[in-house]
């Protein structure tokens, strides 16, 4: 058993004081590995930069020699040593769902950030002691052993079980069948307790009914409710951490929609990715990048079903759900990276491209395009099987046969299951959706017509975006539509000071045939004439009900969305 002790002698320094004890057998050296990434975020993470005061001792408190052999690996000389004592501090002061925060009001530890593991000990159980103040309430999915003690089966179990503690935690609960759910809330919330419990229970019931059960007896929603803008969620096997704001009353509706959206999304991850998992991540290998081609399953399927279950459960009405689809359409069709990379390529390149916006655009989102492709597949399977089957049956089959404990799944196995359930003619569609850069509009139109809906073309409402192909952050150009006429006149990084002699930030923008831009480009201030052009850029679509949908189409719509 590994012993792990965490204390907080000076919370305002934001330093977690951590001690680890490993039992070893006179081997010459041992690699102490700090995870290089975390589940739910498929890019390298700089956890190592927060380590300080690192020391290693033997059982007699003698210092042992060590050296860094990789950025996240400390190699310790361990001859004639039976026990290793590792002491260090971790700077925990970054508020989001995937990191850790310590201050005078709260303790939030995502153990993947800060607890070393070794290949030799990674399957050993861990006796965890956390020095939580007596007046704090806490939530953690690990088995509690005493007032400050927890037991983790192994390192992967530990890092999948974050802890949140504060004197100000609010604990709500509800049950679905024999499964217990806790809503653990820190911070002011504009929603009533009854709203939270009622609507969380609705989408939980819907997901459990669709999947035929739930993988764990207890599940916790750990919610950081903030007074400033934020939106993030991270999945774990028996819990999720949700961070969002602002939580003021004027933003109440937006807060509600974001909370329900991220909570439903993360709950579906309880099956999809925390248990159903790509072969390359079964189990997770935290010491280095793990490339996978199937982000369209892990995040695409989850994004689609996270929203759809809100509609099917009655948390969202049809208008709310169509609003979510329109947001996905905008994000996808305004992204010129859709012409550069397929979904599979973007999934494989995620470790390189990360989650930031790139210019020139060269990738698609495994969340956004992944969700739209899931929608197309779902409706195609429903059509091919006369609504006897749906994409959820693919997820259930994956859960039955391809959890990480059973070795996970390959891209080929996912394709085979989709074809098995949806019919052989779906094979070409799979290839087009996931392996090519073909436009999705025709596939979406065909799929949506089955449920009496259509796509209506929509011009971008911002004239600068639409007529000039420019995207801005304030007055700074951050993107110019590839192959647009504006590429000949303006550059990413230019600051727009005036348009047609009107100060840009204050102007009611109207464009003429030729427009005088005053811009700042580096140290220079320039006047540039930019023609308006005839083409429009960043066009998108919105979903509408067909005015003359047939009774069959309306019935298909009802079966898809769960309409009564």
Image: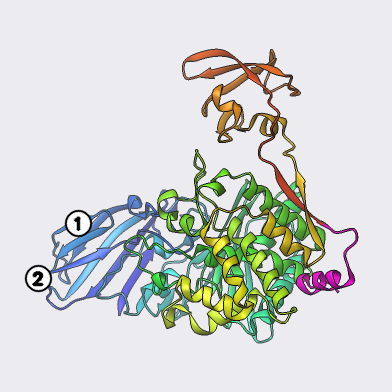
Q: CA distance from mark 1 to mark 2?
A: 18 Å
Earlier sequence position, callout 1 versus callout 2: 1
Residue 69's disc is 1
Give the magenta part as a residue range: 545-564
Q: Residues within 10 Å of mark 2 (few under 14, many from 20)?
A: some
Position of the N terminus, as image quadrant, is bottom left
Location of residue 292 with respect to 331 vertically, above or below = below
Q: Residue at x 63, y 65 (%)?
A: 374
Location of residue 501 with respect to 175 vertically, above or below = above
> Which percent across, then down, holds residue 147?
46, 76
Left or right placement of residue 90 versus residue 315 in this view: left
Residue bearing mark 2:
79
> Which percent across, then down, holds residue 507?
73, 21
Secondary structure beneath dot 1 equals strand
> Which percent across, then down, holds residue 326?
72, 52
> Which percent across, then down, holds residue 401?
50, 84
* 153 vs 390, nearest the viewer: 390
Q: Is residue 546 a member of the stretch shown in magenta?
A: yes
Left or right placement of residue 353 versus residue 206 in this view: left
Q: Quadrant of residue 171?
A: bottom right
Q: Quadrant of residue 86?
A: bottom left
Q: Is residue 135 visible?
A: no
Residue farthest along the bottom direction in this orientation: 178
């Amino acid at each position: 058993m590994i012993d792990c002790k965490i204390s907080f002698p000076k919370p305002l320094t934001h330093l977690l004081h951590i001690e680890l004890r490993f039992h070893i057998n006179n081997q010459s050296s041992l690699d102490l590995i700090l995870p290089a990434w975390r589940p739910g975020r498929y890019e390298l993470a700089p956890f190592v930069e927060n380590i300080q005061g690192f020391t290693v001792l033997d059982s007699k408190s003698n210092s042992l020699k060590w050296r860094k052999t990789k950025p996240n690996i400390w190699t310790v000389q361990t001859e004639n040593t039976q026990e290793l004592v590792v002491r260090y501090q971790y700077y925990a002061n970054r508020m989001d769902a995937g990191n850790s925060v310590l201050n005078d009001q709260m303790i939030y530890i995502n153990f993947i950030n800060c607890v070393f593991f070794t290949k030799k000990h990674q399957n050993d159980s861990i006796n965890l002691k956390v020095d939580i103040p007596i007046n704090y309430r806490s939530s953690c999915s690990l088995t509690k052993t005493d007032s400050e003690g927890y037991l983790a089966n192994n390192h992967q179990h530990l890092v999948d079980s974050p802890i949140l503690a504060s004197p100000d935690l609010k604990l709500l609960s509800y049950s679905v069948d024999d499964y217990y759910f806790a809503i653990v809330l820190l911070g002011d919330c504009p929603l009533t307790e009854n709203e939270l419990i009622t609507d969380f229970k609705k989408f939980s019931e819907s997901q459990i009914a669709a999947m035929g059960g739930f993988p764990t007896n207890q599940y916790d929603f750990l919610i950081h409710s903030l007074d400033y803008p934020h939106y993030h969620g991270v999945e774990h096997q028996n819990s999720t951490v949700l961070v969002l704001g602002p939580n003021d009353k004027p933003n109440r509706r937006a807060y509600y929609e974001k909370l329900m959206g991220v909570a439903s999304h993360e709950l579906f991850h309880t099956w999809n990715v925390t248990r159903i998992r790509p072969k390359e991540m079964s189990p997770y290998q935290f010491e280095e990048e793990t490339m996978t081609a199937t982000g369209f399953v892990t995040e695409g399927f989850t994004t689609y079903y996270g929203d759809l279950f809100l509609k099917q459960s009655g948390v969202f009405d049809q208008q709310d759900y169509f609003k979510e689809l329109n947001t996905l359409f905008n994000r996808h069709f305004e992204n010129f990276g859709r012409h550069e990379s397929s979904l599979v390529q973007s999934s494989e390149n995620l470790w390189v491209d990360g989650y930031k916006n790139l210019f020139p655009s060269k990738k698609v989102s495994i969340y956004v395009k992944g969700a739209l492709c899931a929608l197309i597949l779902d409706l195609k399977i429903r059509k091919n099987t006369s609504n006897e089957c749906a994409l959820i049956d693919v997820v259930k089959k994956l859960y039955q046969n391809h959890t990480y404990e059973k070795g996970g799944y390959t891209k080929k196995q996912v394709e085979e299951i989709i074809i098995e359930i949806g019919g052989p003619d779906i094979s070409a569609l799979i290839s087009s959706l996931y392996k090519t850069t073909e436009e999705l509009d025709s596939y979406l139109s065909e799929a949506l017509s089955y449920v009496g809906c259509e796509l209506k073309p929509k011009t971008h409402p911002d004239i600068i975006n639409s007529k000039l192909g420019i995207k801005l952050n304030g007055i700074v150009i951050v993107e110019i539509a590839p192959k647009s006429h504006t590429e000949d006149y303006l550059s990413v990084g230019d600051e727009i000071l005036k348009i047609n002699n009107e100060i840009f930030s204050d102007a009611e923008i109207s464009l003429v045939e030729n427009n005088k831009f005053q811009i700042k480009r580096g140290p220079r201030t320039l006047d540039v004439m930019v023609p308006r052009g005839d083409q429009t850029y960043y066009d998108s679509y919105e979903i509408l009900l067909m005015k003359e949908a047939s009774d069959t189409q309306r019935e298909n719509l009802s079966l898809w969305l769960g309409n009564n």
